Image: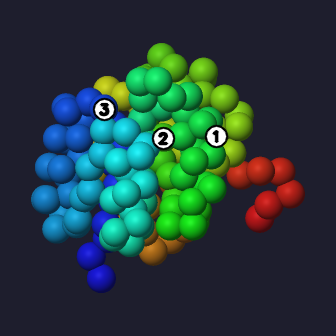
Amino acid sequence: MVPTLLIVDDSRTVRTLARQACLAQGWHLLEAVDVPQGLKSAERVPVDLILLDTTLRGLEVTDALRIFREQESTRSIPIVLLAPSLGQGAVSPAARAHALGILAKPFSRSDLDRTLRHWLMRTDPSAAAPAAYSPTPAPSGST
């Protein structure tokens, strides 16, 4: 089965990089510029991974994550946050708790390729995450 990604980012450049990465791998990509558009897409097509911008206009990332987690169609879909490299540390613990990790922007096409392959095609769940990717620590008490 071919993986389907959903990118929610208001930057045309970031969406274009994601489109190029997915086309090169033969994966499907749904694009949205905001959370409502992303939810509509995810209701129509099953999604394997969400790439979510942490700096969407008019919406805090914790609110965006809450919205995705409240909807049946997106509740269990893994989410990777796309954050400005200088703002990675500013991503709140609440946001980190609902995401697999953070991919620092700006990122190269190869950084994105490695991150997507890591989460979509990995055979070893304990494999190290790509260098440009900052995994979110597991909540305490989890295995």
* Residue on which the image places disc 2: 81
What amino acid type is highlighted by mark number 1?
Arg
- Of residue 80 and residue 70, the one placed in the foreground of this image is 70
> Residue 102, percent across and down?
50, 39
* Residue on which the image places disc 3: 10
Relative to residue 14, is residue 48 depicted above or below? below
- Few, some or many residues within 10 Å of mark 3 (<14, 14–19, 20+): some
- Of residue 34 and residue 142, the one placed in the foreground of this image is 34
> Residue 37, percent across and down?
35, 48
Cα–Cα gap, marks 2 and 1? 8 Å
Mark 1 or mark 3, which has the lower sequence index? Answer: 3
For the point 50% across and 67% down, which residue is it? 73
For the point 57% across and 60% down, which residue is it? 71
Relative to residue 81, is residue 43 depicted above or below? below
Cα–Cα gap, marks 1 and 3? 20 Å
Cα–Cα gap, marks 3 and 2? 13 Å
> Residue 79, percent across and down?
50, 52
How is the model colour-coded? rainbow
> Residue 15, percent across and down?
23, 41
Q: Can residue 133 be seen by looking at this rendering?
A: no
* Residue on which the image places disc 1: 96
Helix, strand or loop at disc 3? loop
